Image (tube, helix red, strand yellow):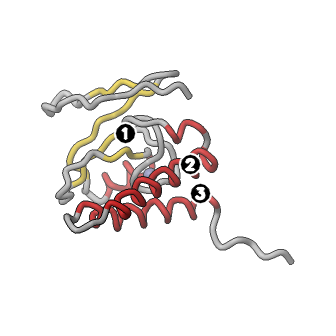
Amino acid sequence: MSKKPEMTRKAALAVLHQFSDAVSWQWFLPEVSPERKALKDEVQTALRTLDTVVHGTRASCYGFGFGLCQICYLRYSASTVRLKGDPSGYAHACCTSCLRMLDDEGRLRHIEQVLTGVSSGVLVPPVTLRSRRKAVYSCSH
Ligand SMILES: [Zn+2]
């Protein structure tokens, strides 16, 4: 009987992303040394490198509507969300499964649906909310 790995490659990578997010606030402390800041950049590059190995080249793309869901890091994103109680106010790329979960839990403050095309994405702000359009970068993958 062969022993199965404890987690899939996607799950392992997702844990590393979530760990990185959990400690990322420390990078912005004033006493952080230049070496630590350089390490932060290396960690982000390492994660992006693994993203493309595990999920495919589209995971390396920037911009909302491209790349991985920033909630679960298991699937590609399809929307951009802002969460209630998130002091950063950052928009997070979000997959359809996480969108449903966050909606069920009543944690969504704002949603922008992203329509992805072959090489670019279009953000469609909800008509009831005044929202600034986010920059969308084209993706060649
Ligand atoms: Zn997700």
Residue found at x 24% / y 48%: 90
Quarter of the N terminus within the rendering: bottom right
Q: Which comes sooner in the sequence, label 3 or label 2?
A: 3
Disc on res. 79: 1
Residue at the far left: name it.
Answer: 130
- Amino acid on which disc 3 is placed: Lys
Q: Residues within 10 Å of mark 3 (few under 14, many from 20)?
A: some
Q: Which residue is mark 2?
A: 49
Is label 1 in a helix, a strand or a loop? strand
Residue found at x 42% / y 67%: 19
Queried on whether the Cβ of the residue with tag 3 lies below 8 angstroms from ligand 1, the answer reads: no
Coordinates of residue 22 in the picture (x, y in percent): 35, 66
Mark whose residue sits in front, 3 or 1: 3
Is label 3 in a helix, a strand or a loop? helix
- Amino acid on which disc 2 is placed: Thr
Q: Which comes sooner in the sequence, label 3 or label 1?
A: 3
The residues tagged by marks 2 and 1 sit, at their Cα atoms, a distance apart of 23 Å
Q: Which residue is mark 3?
A: 10
Q: Which comes sooner in the sequence, label 2 or label 1?
A: 2
Mark whose residue sits in front, 2 or 1: 2
Quarter of the C terminus within the rendering: top right
Q: Is residue 71 left or right of residue 134?
A: right
In this rendering, the count of numbered labels is 3
68 or 36, which lies in front? 36
The residues tagged by marks 3 and 1 sit, at their Cα atoms, a distance apart of 20 Å
Is 89 drawn above or below residue 138 in the view shown?
below
Residue at the far right: name it.
Answer: 1
The answer to the question of whether label 3 and label 1 lie on touching residues, with beta carbons closer than 8 A, is no
The answer to the question of whether label 2 and label 1 lie on touching residues, with beta carbons closer than 8 A, is no
Residue found at x 63% / y 68%: 7
- Amino acid on which disc 1 is placed: Ser
